[in-house]
Every structure is written in C-alpha cells, then in structure tokens.
Amino acid sequence: MAQSRLIIMRHGESAWTDPSVNRFAGWVDVPLTERGRAQAKEAGILMKEAGIAPDAVFTSLLSRSIVSADIALEELGRLWIPVLRSWRLNERHYGAFQGQTRPAMRAKYGDELFATYRRSFDVRPPVIDEDSPSFQGSDPRYGTAAEDGLGGPNPATIRSECLKDVIARLEPFWKSYVTPPLLLGQTVLVVTHGSVVRSLIKVIEGLSDDDIRSVNVPTGQPRVYEFESGIFGELHLKGPGCYLDPDAAKRGAEEACALGSAPAATE
C-alpha cells in the first residue's frame, strides 16, 4: 500500500491581512506583503529541512496563492514540478464584505451577526453588488479558462459563499485531481487560502460544524497529513495533521483571530 503526504498551506501575509489594513479580500486579487514573501520562503525552508519534496502543486487563481507557491518551490529547488491552478481553491467569496474592513463590518452588523457571517458553517454574508469593483464578474480568469467539467456554479456569477459552499466546490476537485496522486504515493502541496484550509481540515479530520468555527489558520505555515492507500482505491489518514513549526503556527493563528476581533470602528 502506497504512503503519501499532503501539505496544505495558506498563502503568506497579503496587503489586506496586514493588521494595519485588515480588509476582507475574498476573491479580490491582493498581493503579498514583504513579510508574506518572507513567510513563503520560510515555508520552503521548513519543508526542505523536513525532507518534503512535492511531486505536484495546486494553487488558486489568485496571485497571493500563486506567488507563495512559487517562492516556496524555488526554495525547494522544485519550480519545475507540475502546477494546476483552479478557482475551486480560491478563498471563500465574502460577498458584500469584500474590500471592506473587518472593524467597519463589525460596527455595521454588530458582534453577533458579524461573527455569524464570518464564522458560521452555513450562513452566507450579504451578496456583493454586481457593479462593485470587488465583484469578479468580468474578470477573464473566471471565463472559459475556468471551465473544468466538474459541475457546480459558474465562478463568474458567485456573489457570496459560506464554508459549506466552499466544501461543495472543493469536493469534485479533490476527488478528480488531489486524490489520484496521493493514491500513487506522491507528495502533494496545496497552497491556498484560510477558508479553504479550514474546509480541508474539517473534511480530513472530521470536525463538526461548531468546532470548525474556532479554527484559525496562520499565514505561510505548512500543515502536513500522511495517508496510506487501501486495496480498494481509498485513502486512510494515518494520524492528525501537524504544522512543521507548531510555535510559529500558534502565533500566526492568534494573529488571524485578532483580525476578526479588532475593535469596531468609532467616529
């Protein structure tokens, strides 16, 4: 039976996850900060020191995911390996919250409703207006190039998502593209976004809808899972996932949590 590894990682810090900015990005294509680039480089170093050599890489269509993967792969000396990019690995679509600061949305909706929109498994934020500059409807990356034959919604028309929606769009991609190399005993790296990492943690580790609310994902920290393939073509998880640098991951998760609990804006 083949032994395989899955590494999932949130991109490095972006310009909008910088605490001084603290905006919901979602599907808005926000670049990395210099700190974010350094985090991606450190992720590559951590994987190299752990003897991890990815055979295949998956990213979203957003540059903070793409660039983070490239920086880590360069550190690993594996820029040459196959990379597949998909909108199904995009961050959760935050609807009308996209482009808005977290404190402003917290002030507008109140603590309880803000927490529900941000963390509930099955409640979507208000939909984004189609004339918003943060709406992706006319973005060419969600046109014919995004068609993958896996069904589901047209990505150009998505106007808001909850975590349940993210898992629904991820499932066919996981089965069609991520599972096959794992069954062959390969090492797979997925560089994606916080809500997608949370979705994968929920599915892989079997967390409840309530338990996933409290999971915060650090930027630029690789999380490793080991699998064994069964005789009937199924994957068996060999143990819980672990971060390669648990202390740094803990600090990063605390930073992510603090973004959501920043004080509401006052006049």
Image (cartoon, rainbow, N blue to C red):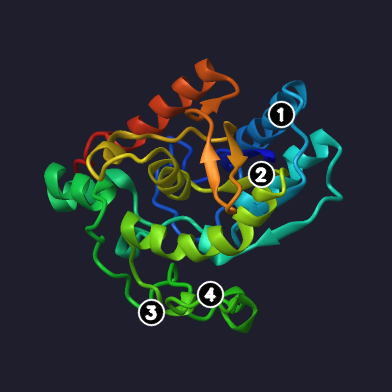
Mark whose residue sits in front, 4 or 3: 4
Residue 150 - label: 4
Element type at mark 3: loop
Quarter of the image for the C terminus: give it: top left
Give the left or right position of residue 103, taking residue 109 as reference: right
Mark whose residue sits in front, 3 or 2: 2
Residue in front for this viewpoint, 199 or 12? 199
Q: Residue 89: x percent and y percent?
A: 53, 58
Q: Which residue is under mark 3?
A: 131
Question: Mark 1 and mark 3: span between their CA atoms?
Answer: 42 Å
Residue 47 - label: 1
At x 39%, y 63%, the residue is 168
Element type at mark 1: helix
First-in-chain label (1 vs 4):
1
Q: Amino acid at mark 4?
A: Leu
Q: Residue 96: x percent and y percent?
A: 31, 64
Give the left or right position of residue 195, taking residue 267 as reference: right
Number of marks in the rendered image: 4
